[in-house]
Amino acid sequence: MTPPSLLFRIASKLVSLYVRIRHAGVPPGYRYYYRNTYLCKLVQFKYVVADFIRRKPYKVIGFDGEFGPDLQFALPHAYWHYKNGTLKATQSTKFMGEFYYFSPEHTATFDRRTTEGNYNYDLPRTLYSHDYDMSKWTPVPLKEIYRNDVYVYEKPILIIANRYNQEWDGPPVSFLSVEVIDFIIRSLKDRYTIIYNRPKLAQIVMDNSDFHDLGEFDWLRREHPEVLLMEDLFQANRGNARNYNHFQLQLYANAERFISTHGGTSVLASYFGGINLILSKQGPEHHFNCYQTLYPQLSGATILHAKTDEEVKQYVQSHFAGAGQPASATALVS
């Protein structure tokens, strides 16, 4: 990460002072993100001529932050530049080429995702914000691009996208337990083709979160053989995917119902319309209302935010067990 210039450091201090005055009622731990929002706005001013007057390919967008922010901020910003005629090249970690399919030149520049990489002030936003009205940000039509005739089943697809990782340097917090997974499957298996997804280490690029063992895979094979496991489908690879991310895009593009968890899994599932039920028990997303403001913009999906296991069960019964057509661009919270 390039050290900030003297001018940027001065601007940062001035903006920090402004935030302390303008947003005095905001908890100190969140003011940092308010500051970042204003800094991102300021940085974009230097590209006004290149973006709106010259409008020739010049922009190189590189991002080595976490998977979720990559999809939330770097990817839509790159797509905006592509549509604007100003995108020159993109850089990300390996296995991301299919997300950046529109890029004139995409390279897998980075070997690992880092927390520091999230704070790329050259993007319209970094992480959480009190203002998600982004002018240079256009969601990528991943569903339209990757919809296919390969992963089609008699019943509509429901994808359970779980994770069981270290969170905030501590144990896992927002994950679907075996008990909750069992409830979901028993409630919905007659209505949906249920596909379970929790990627293994070898299938994705690691960030700073350690993986833990939930022990659910053997249990699923034994207790719920009707559930399809993503790793088994990827091994068969009927869609000739080039990597696991490409495979996820193929499968998700054919689905309209998702149950996902806090972090990158929930962001990915929000790109494909329909209904996405997200279990998020804590995090800055709650303060900044990300599930009501940012996530629905990714595809017009209906976002249901559950803060507890019990709320997951309630939403499963009310919106999945007898679900009709999803509303458009709507976020529902408890």
Image (spheres, helix red, strand yellow):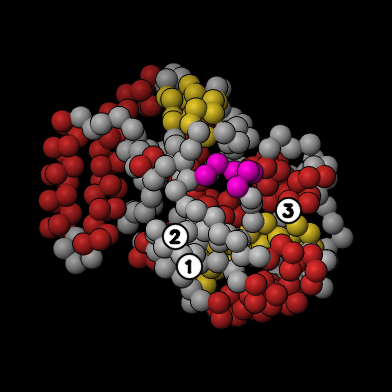
Marks 1 and 3 in Cβ contact (< 8 Å): no
Return the residue nearer the eye: 232 or 210.
210
Segment colored magenta = 201-206
Instruction: Kindly report the distance in space between the C-alpha atoms of the residues bearing marks 2 and 3.
Output: 24 Å
Q: Which residue is mark 3?
A: 230
Instruction: Decide if residue 217 is in sight here.
Output: yes
- Which residue: 64% across, 44% down? 203
Element at badge 3? helix
Instruction: Kindly report the distance in space between the C-alpha atoms of the residues bearing marks 1 and 3.
Output: 23 Å
Give the mark nearest the N terminus, 2 or 3: 2
Q: Position of residue 18 (x, y in %)?
A: 14, 51
Instruction: Kindly report the distance in space between the C-alpha atoms of the residues bearing marks 1 and 2.
Output: 7 Å
| Disc 2 versus disc 3: nearer the observer | 2
Left or right of 108? Residue 42 is: left
Residue 125 is one of the magenta-drawn residues: no
Q: Which residue is mark 2?
A: 167
Residue 173, numbered circle: 1
Element at badge 1? loop
Density class for disc 1 (Cα within 10 Å; few <14, some 14-19, many ≥20) is some
Left or right of 28? Residue 302 is: right
Give the mark nearest the N terminus, 1 or 2: 2
Tell me which amino acid carries mark 3.
Answer: Met
Tell me which amino acid carries mark 1.
Answer: Val
Residue 330 against residue 100 in the figure, above or below? below
Marks 1 and 2 in Cβ contact (< 8 Å): yes
- Which residue: 32% across, 38% down? 121
Tell me which amino acid carries mark 2.
Answer: Glu
